[in-house]
Image: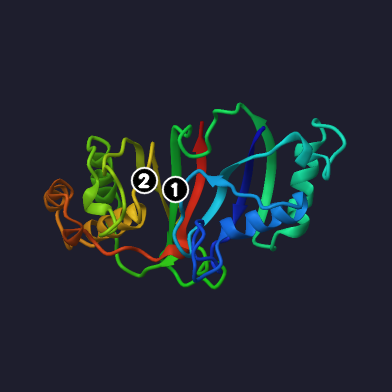
Amino acid sequence: MRYFITFSYDGTRYHGWQRQPNGITVQQCLEEALSAILRTDIEVTGAGRTDTGVHASMMVAHVDLEPSQQLSVASTQEQFPQQLAYRLNRILPHDIAVESVELVEPDKHARFSATSRTYYYYLHTRKDPFRCQYSWETHYQLDFPLMNEAAEWLLGQEDFASFCKTGADVKTTLCHLTHAEWRQLSPTEWRFEITANRFLRNMVRAVVGTLVEVGRHRITLERFQEIVLSHSRTQAGESMPAHALFLVDIKY
């Protein structure tokens, strides 16, 4: 029986989502908690990978369980999802929180059944001790209308190799973007919103870094387009700090 686990996490102290041999990850913590509750080794499959230091206000993973494994948690199948969520939240660290556990069809896949994913990247333009952990502080004078013009142009593109981390193990660099926009939240706060069917490794932070170059008038809109069409990562802007990036939504 397949269950979807929907949860969130603060990625500050984790080496990303996926298990790593040399650092603690969110996947490791979730699997260890499930293994302790169900009294057997458990593996989960996530909807995607977030890099070191990246957060998720919504993440999904699926787990396959036998009916017998559920008996240690609840006496009935109907009670199991709620009881498992409750027990996970009791065991998991304070920076990982389970929202729900849901029984799904056996062929519904946390990663491959997803139709879109949305990320937010936050920045603020005035020093603020209460935002520095989750937002990038900048004092550059940024031309946000021009940055939005560049972001809108991205929606007509398909190949995003220019924003893919060098050496990433991917079969294709094609993505279908449906939304890319800078939105002002307050006089000193902005958020970049981007939605696509899939994302390449490091893609969002590289897109933001290159858009910032446009906003600083260090590259023109025409040059930005040339960089994207070059399919060369070395021509694009720097990768932005991870602490301001959030995975916020996954659609199925």
Q: Which residue is at the far right?
A: 75
72 on left or right of 99: right
Of 173 and 58, the residue lying toward us: 173
Look at mark 1 in the image and give the residue it sits on: 119
Question: Disc 2 to disc 1, how far (Cα)?
Answer: 10 Å
Task: Tell me the quarter of the picture where residue 176 sits.
Answer: top left
Q: Residue at x 22, y 56 (%)?
A: 214
Q: Quadrant of the N terminus?
A: top right
Identity, as a three-letter code, of the amino acid under mark 2: Phe
Look at mark 2 in the image and give the residue it sits on: 199
Question: How far across and down, in percent of the image, does residue 107 sit?
Answer: 54, 28
Of 107 and 235, the residue lying toward us: 107
Q: Are marks 2 and 1 in contact (CB under 8 Å)?
A: yes
Which element is circle 2 on?
Answer: loop
Identity, as a three-letter code, of the amino acid under mark 1: Tyr
Choose the circle earlier in sequence order: 2 or 1.
1
* Observer able to see residue 135: no
Question: How far across and down, in percent of the image, does residue 127 sit?
Answer: 47, 72
Query: Relative to 19, is 67 above or below?
Result: above
Query: Relative to 57, is 71 above or below?
Result: above
Which element is circle 1 on?
Answer: strand
